[in-house]
Structure formats: structure tokens, C-alpha cells
Image (cartoon, grey):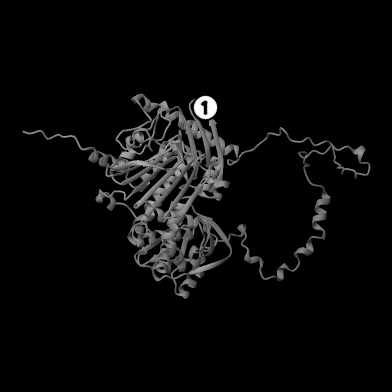
């Protein structure tokens, strides 16, 4: 038999590696920007065309590369970061495996212009599908200029699975934000199709967070800072009142690298127990600084999952640090008896104010004993009680009033209580006369009503959600704009990735009744809201709607519309415990049975159930 095992060609091996490292245009942006940071750049410009599918260009002012290094950088496992295996445990750079540029060049057409600071001429290198097309000297500024065109041009199957431009651009923004948040001393610019989306000058950490997510987040941040022999933790956590169900900004960084860590997230969440409503989360930006030998970043192709040597100890330090921060800023209720530093209040000196009024005096009987009760009251007490005193005129005329004494039952006269059926007789007759079925509310949650087969129990909140959902879906289907103008518009700010989603659902929001005015830089004025949601926070409601649409991504339009209608219906529906009048219960029940599917909410929860007559009879056997 002939031999069947052969070595793969480098071009095929690089394409296989690209499947792990380069998954979408956002992966290219991440790798090129991280390389720019490692090169010591102080300014990085990123420009993408058609969400990176057509072109991705990254320009930096780093140290640049020589002619030989420019050629070697695209070879597989070529790196300047490590020399031996032990170097993996003392990493201080973002990239180190030498797979990124080789993987990019294997699935795209790459053009590199680079020049070192002490060089007179730079290098122009063109590579397509791992093959060098040309290499020549060229005049270019200091640093590197990467152009990645036609991503996955030679792997049509991979290109076919790319999402819509809006989704891919959102992924690029996510990766861009992660790098920008951990490098506030570097200025960044991001352009899409020639339009500037982000301009972040070099600044402090707090200003960088504000630059990425807007000025409003500034008032929600509390400083976090703890320094131990094992770890140094700093950053910001959100105030409890800034919690939200969706869209919380939650970031962990370790040694200048973004990471996902559910175990540490649990530590932060536990610190907010009983401070935020169940199901809501707060934003946080937490930075760890640990010895490189205590972590392993080489366990995932994208290096976002990191293993710590002392995770349990770090968990306790992090939880204690967050609790201390909340307590220091009085976010946890406390009683403070510390009077140190308080000014002394001098005692009043009467000699300095001879004209001051005399203080009031009190008189008392020192021989009085409240426990010394006489055996019998003085006889004069009875004489005063029996005499015509001043209080008797107060009761004159009562015998001529509308309510007679026999209206009030007296216990010692043997009064018998009326049967329960008699007490409710009038109420029942009124209901029958009106021709409507009586409804009863139980604990502010359920509506009980009689039906032919037994007793029907309706969850009032879910019933209202079902009614409102159908109403909002009907508005969007018919393109009806039932908007209510507001006298004083609210301002709402969205980050660049949220603006992309907002533009995609703009028409649906308009059909629901929202009227927004674009004020620029991601800020919008809420000029109108849907009728019936008065009292709700428009800013939080719009944020929830945008994040609901972002979760759905670029799916079918009807599915996104359904998600928007459900979110708005849940926000506008009556809350549990709300007391309803008979008319309100009648309207709710009638509205529920007017919809197409009254038995279940749009997300599949039971709205009503029937307790059958035979089951009720069995309970009393």
C-alpha cells in the first residue's frame, strides 16, 4: 500500500488557522489594532468600508518594520514577542503567537506600507492568498499602514456566512471599544464608509469611558481601587440606581487585555445583592494587574478566556473591594456616629445678652406618686358628673338625627349577625341588573370570574401584556403613528453600536408612537411617546428596545417587531398588586377575549386557567 499521510501546504494550513483566529472583519480589526499597540503607537486610525467586507485599513505611528521584518511578519508563527516556551508565562504584549498576519494574508488581499523612524525609505508589500504579489521600496511615514481588502475572497463558503453590514459593524465597534478602554493614553479614530463614528483623544480612564459611552454614564460611576500583594484592582463600578435589565456595560481587563470571566462577574453581582432589583445588572469597568506568571492567556484562540492561579482568593478580594466602594460612597444605608472634625457649638452665655428673654419654668409637686391610687374617687367627682355640666349640650339633638340608636347593635342585647348571603345580596342584584358577570380581584394579582365549566382565574398583568402586544403589533402592521407629544422632551444618548441598531428599527419605533429628533453625536430628543405609557422613563424604555433589537440581530423583520412590541407591552402593563375597579376588571377581561390568543402571552406564559366544577366539589367531600 502507498503512503497516505502528507504535510499540508502552508497556504492550506494558514486557511485552517484563519478559521480559528479570523472569524469575521472584527477579528481583523482586533488583531491589527493590538499589533499597533504593541508597536508603541500613540495614535491609531481605523477605517472600514462596507462593515469591513470590502476594505479594512489600520494606520499607526508605531516603530514600524524593516524590509526583512515586513516579509517575515506574514510567515506562520513568526513573532518578536517570545523566544522560548518559558516566555509564555511572562507576557507583557497583546499578541505573541505569530498567527494573526499569516491568517489574514491567507484569506484576503493585504497591502502593507511600513517605515522605521530611522529609515529614509519604507517598504511596500502586497500579498494575496498567502502568496507575495510584489515587494518594493516606497516613501511612507513612520509606522505601519495595513489595508486588508476582499476578506474571504478565496473562501466563498466563509464569506457567505458573514452577517449583515449592521451586525458586522456592531462587532467591529465591540472589539474597537475593548481595545480603546484599556489604552486611554492612545488616541483612536474609527471611520465607516468615510463617516467618523468615534474620535477618542488621549485622556484619563474616566474620560475614555465617557468618550465611548457618553457623558451620562459619568454620574453613575464609583471609583474602585485596592492594592494587595497578590493583585491590584482599579476601575469603576456603577451605582445601584443605575441598574438596568439590558445593556449594562460590563468589562474585565487583566494586564491590559480584555477577558470574559463569569466567576468574577458573580463576585460583583453578589456585592449588589438586595441593592438592585432581581434580574437587573449594573455597569462596571474593572482592571486587574497581576504577575504574568500567575495567569495563562494561551487557552483560547482569541485569548479572551484567561486562567488565574488563585481565582478563589481573587474572588474574595474583588467582592470585598466592590462592597467597600459602595459603602464608602454611602450607596449602602448606614448610620454614621463619627463627629470628628465637627465644629464645637459654644454654650449660651446670659451675661453677654442681658436683654435675652428668661427661659420658661415648670412647676411640679414633688410629693406626687402616680402609683398611689385612692380606694375611691372623691365624692365631688360624682356630683360633677351628675350635674348639668358643659359637655351635655354636645349630645343634644342626636335623637332627631338621621341615624337612630337602634342602627347600632349592642353586644349585650343579643344581636345576631346577618347571614353572608344577605350581606352580598345587594351587590349580586346590581350585577345581575347590569347584565354583566361579577369579577373579583385576589391579592392584586388575579381576577376571578365565573364561567360555565367552573371558576376562571386570570393573571391580570399577563392579560394586559397580551392585550397591549396585539395593539402594538397592529399599529406597526398598519403603520399607524399614535404618538403623544411631550411638553419637555427628554434627552437620550446612544453609543455608536447602539446608533446602528436604532437606525435599523427607526421606522418601527415611529409606528409604535416614538418621535425622536437627532441632535448629533448619538444624542436624540424624545419629542413624542406612545399613548398610554405616561409615567414610564422614556430613556430607559428606548434603551431596552434598542438592546432587544440588538439581541435579535439581523433576523426577520417581523421577529424584531414582535420583540419590540413585547418589550413595550411589558413596560406599559399594570404591575402586580395594582388594585382594579369593577369597570377596569370588566374592560381587561373583555379586551383579553377579544385578542386572537388569550390563553398565552407572546413569550409562552399561561394567562388564564379554569378550576372545573367537579374539582371544586371534590375539595369539599
SS at badge 1: loop
Percent position of residue 477, x then y: 38, 69
User: What is the quadrant of residue 557 in the picture?
Assistant: bottom left
**Residue pointed to by mark 1:** 228
- Which of these two is toward me, 165 or 525? 165
Q: Residues within 10 Å of mark 1 (few under 14, many from 20)?
A: few
Residue under the image location 29 percent in, 48 percent down: 152
Position of the C terminus, as image quadrant, is: bottom left
Q: Residue furthest left?
A: 1
Q: Quadrant of residue 449?
A: bottom left
Residue 126 at x, y percent in the picture = 32, 44
Horizontal side of 195 relative to 535 (left or right) equals: left
Can residue 109 be seen?
yes
Q: Residue furthest right?
A: 354
- Residue drawn where x is 36% and y is 24% of the image: 86
Give how far across and how far down residue 47 sits, in percent. Answer: 42, 50
> In front here: 434 or 604?
604
Q: Position of residue 518 (x, y in %)?
A: 52, 61
Q: Is residue 260 visible?
A: no
Q: Quadrant of residue 302?
A: top left
Does 184 sit above or below residue 456? above
Seen in the image, is 224 located left or right of residue 152?
right
Q: Residue at x 52, y 41 (%)?
A: 237
Amino acid at each position: 500500500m502507498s503512503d497516505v499521510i502528507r504535510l499540508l501546504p502552508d497556504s492550506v494550513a494558514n486557511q485552517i488557522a484563519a478559521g480559528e483566529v479570523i472569524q469575521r472583519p472584527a477579528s481583523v480589526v482586533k488583531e491589527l489594532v493590538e499589533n499597533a499597540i504593541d508597536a508603541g503607537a500613540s495614535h491609531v486610525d481605523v477605517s472600514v468600508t462596507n462593515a469591513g467586507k470590502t476594505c479594512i485599513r489600520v494606520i499607526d505611528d508605531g516603530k514600524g518594520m524593516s524590509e526583512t521584518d515586513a516579509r517575515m511578519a506574514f510567515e506562520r508563527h513568526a513573532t518578536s514577542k517570545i523566544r522560548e516556551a518559558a516566555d509564555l508565562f511572562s507576557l507583557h504584549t497583546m499578541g505573541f503567537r505569530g498567527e494573526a498576519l499569516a491568517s489574514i494574508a491567507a484569506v484576503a488581499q493585504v497591502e502593507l506600507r511600513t517605515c522605521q523612524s530611522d529609515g529614509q525609505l519604507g517598504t511596500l508589500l502586497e500579498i494575496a492568498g498567502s502568496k507575495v504579489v510584489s515587494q518594493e521600496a516606497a516613501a511612507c511615514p513612520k509606522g505601519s499602514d495595513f489595508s486588508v481588502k476582499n476578506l474571504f475572497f478565496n473562501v466563498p463558503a466563509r464569506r457567505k456566512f458573514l452577517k449583515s453590514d449592521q451586525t458586522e459593524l456592531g462587532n467591529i465597534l465591540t472589539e474597537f471599544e475593548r481595545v480603546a478602554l484599556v489604552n486611554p493614553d492612545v488616541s483612536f479614530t474609527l471611520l465607516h464608509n468615510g463617516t467618523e463614528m468615534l474620535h477618542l483623544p488621549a485622556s484619563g480612564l474616566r474620560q475614555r469611558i465617557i468618550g465611548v459611552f457618553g457623558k451620562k454614564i459619568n454620574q453613575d460611576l464609583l471609583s474602585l481601587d485596592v492594592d494587595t500583594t497578590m493583585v491590584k484592582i482599579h476601575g469603576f463600578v456603577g451605582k445601584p440606581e443605575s441598574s438596568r435589565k439590558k445593556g449594562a456595560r460590563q468589562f474585565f481587563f487583566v494586564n491590559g487585555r480584555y477577558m470574559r470571566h463569569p466567576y468574577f462577574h458573580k463576585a460583583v453581582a453578589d456585592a449588589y445583592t438586595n441593592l438592585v432589583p432581581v434580574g437587573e445588572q449594573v455597569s462596571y469597568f474593572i482592571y486587574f494587574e497581576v504577575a504574568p506568571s500567575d495567569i495563562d492567556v494561551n487557552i483560547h484562540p482569541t485569548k479572551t478566556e484567561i486562567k488565574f492561579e488563585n481565582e478563589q482568593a481573587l474572588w474574595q478580594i474583588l467582592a470585598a473591594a466592590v462592597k467597600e466602594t459602595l459603602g464608602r460612597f454611602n450607596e449602602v444605608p448606614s448610620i454614621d456616629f463619627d463627629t470628628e472634625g465637627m465644629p464645637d457649638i459654644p454654650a449660651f452665655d446670659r451675661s453677654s445678652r442681658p436683654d435675652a428673654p428668661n427661659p420658661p419654668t415648670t412647676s411640679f409637686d414633688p410629693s406626687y406618686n402616680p402609683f398611689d391610687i385612692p380606694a375611691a374617687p372623691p365624692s365631688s367627682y360624682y356630683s360633677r358628673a351628675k350635674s348639668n355640666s358643659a359637655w351635655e349640650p354636645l349630645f343634644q339633638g342626636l335623637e332627631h338625627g338621621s341615624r337612630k340608636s337602634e342602627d347600632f347593635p349592642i353586644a349585650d342585647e343579643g344581636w345576631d349577625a346577618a347571614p353572608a348571603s344577605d350581606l352580598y345580596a345587594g351587590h349580586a342584584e346590581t350585577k345581575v341588573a347590569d347584565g354583566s358577570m361579577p369579577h373579583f380581584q385576589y391579592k392584586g394579582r388575579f381576577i376571578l370570574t365565573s364561567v360555565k365549566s367552573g371558576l376562571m382565574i386570570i393573571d391580570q398583568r399577563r392579560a394586559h401584556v397580551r392585550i397591549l402586544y396585539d395593539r402594538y403589533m397592529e399599529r406597526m402592521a398598519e403603520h399607524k403613528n399614535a404618538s403623544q407629544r411631550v411638553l419637555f422632551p427628554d434627552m437620550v444618548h446612544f453609543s455608536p453600536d447602539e446608533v446602528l441598531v436604532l437606525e435599523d428599527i427607526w421606522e418601527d419605533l415611529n409606528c409604535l408612537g416614538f418621535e425622536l429628533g437627532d441632535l448629533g453625536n448619538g444624542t436624540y430628543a424624545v419629542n413624542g411617546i406612545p399613548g398610554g405609557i405616561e409615567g414610564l422613563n422614556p430613556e430607559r424604555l428606548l434603551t431596552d428596545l434598542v438592546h432587544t433589537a440588538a439581541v435579535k440581530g439581523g433576523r426577520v423583520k417581523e421577529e424584531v417587531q414582535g420583540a419590540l412590541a413585547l418589550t413595550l407591552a411589558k413596560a406599559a402593563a399594570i404591575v402586580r398588586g395594582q388594585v382594579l375597579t369593577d369597570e377596569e376588571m370588566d374592560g381587561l377581561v373583555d379586551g383579553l377575549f377579544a385578542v386572537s390568543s388569550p390563553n398565552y402571552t407572546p413569550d409562552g406564559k399561561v394567562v388564564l386557567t379554569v378550576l372545573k366544577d367537579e374539582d371544586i366539589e371534590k375539595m369539599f367531600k
